[in-house]
Image (cartoon, rainbow, N blue to C red):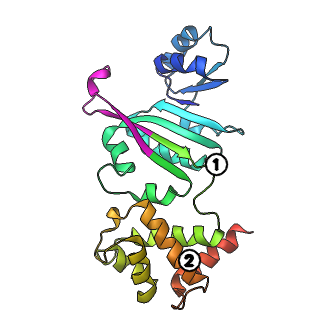
Amino acid sequence: MEVGAGKGALTEALAPRCRELISYEIDRHLIPGLRERLARGPRVRIVHQDFLQAAPPREPFALVGNVPYARTAEIVAWALRAVPGLTSATLLTQVEYARKRTGDYGRWSLLTVRSWPEVEWRLCGRVARSAFRPVPAVDGGILRLTRRPRPLLTDPVARSVYADLVELGFTGVGGSLYASLRRACPARALDRAFRAAGLERDVVVAYATPEQWLILAQELTEVAAGTRSSAVPKELMVRVKSRVDNSNL
């Protein structure tokens, strides 16, 4: 699937490499030229529609596109909702957006950390603004999301603990990640988890890497499962139990 075919430059390059290519374009004035340019490509289907209104294919698919910068967040959200059918999304975005989402600034966003167990985020390159016509104000960045063949967390309780910890941690209450998590987790268990993850107690949430979040979840899931001597973080486990019960309905 291609987001925003435009005049078809990327579409034309993709066509020979795809068993089937579905290209979406919202501007009706571009449709006749697209269809004429790609008339020799029987495996290409041009769809005059807002991509965000499209349903994901029933079979596994890859997403690609030079996306409208103003709609990047919506398109990325669509891609994440399409997991696990989505195998990958390769998107040309503003370089600042791509760097922010992939930790290239040394900080990590809620969206990336939240989806990390299922999706890998990578910055694959930079495209100078001078390569575009008309020339935009900023450079472009090649952002690639890849669905993991096997999620990093497979146990339902571990997934729920991870999700709730991340949401709680990114509230920012208390000024540090430790303070935010302390509202639901006992100090002894949290101290042990922070040591295992190599985190200082005063670390700001944005500086905790996805790998460190996975360690925190692993340590605190063990507490929740009763394999540690520390008290169970009750407030956290109420939410976890509710999430797991609802997922089994």
Which label lies toward us, 2 or 1?
A: 2
Judge from the rendering whether residue 188 lies leftward or rightward of residue 79; answer left or right: left
Q: Is residue 127 above or below residue 89?
A: above
Q: Residue at x 51, y 17 (%)?
A: 13
| Quadrant into which the C terminus falls | bottom right
Residue for badge 2: 221
Q: Is residue 183 visible?
A: no
CB of mark 2 within 8 Å of CB of mark 1?
A: no
Residue 147 % position (x, y) = 57, 47
Q: Where is 149 relative to 158, above or below?
A: above
The picture places residue 6, in percent across and down from the top left corner, at 46, 21
Three-letter code, disc 1: Pro
Categorize mark 2 by other alpha carbons within 10 Å: few (<14), some (14-19), many (20+): many
Quadrant where the image shows the N terminus: top right
Depth order, front residue of 152/101 = 152
Between discs 2 and 1, the one toward the N terminus: 1
Q: What crowding class fits label 1: few (fewer than 14 Cα within 10 Å), some (14-19), or many (20 or more)?
A: some
Q: Which residue is mark 1?
A: 84
Residue at 37 percent across and 34 percent down: it is 125
Between 70 and 244, the one nearer to me in the picture: 244
Q: Label 2 sits on what residue type?
A: Thr
Residue at x 66%, y 72% (from the top left corner): 244
- For the residues labelled 2 and 1, the Cα–Cα distance comes to 24 Å
Q: Is residue 177 above or below residue 127?
A: below
Part of the protein shown in magenta = 122-143
Check residue 131 for magenta coloring.
yes
Q: Secondary structure at mark 1?
A: loop
Residue 148 in view of the camera: yes
Quadrant location of residue 128? top left
Residue 88: where, in percent of width, then height? 56, 40
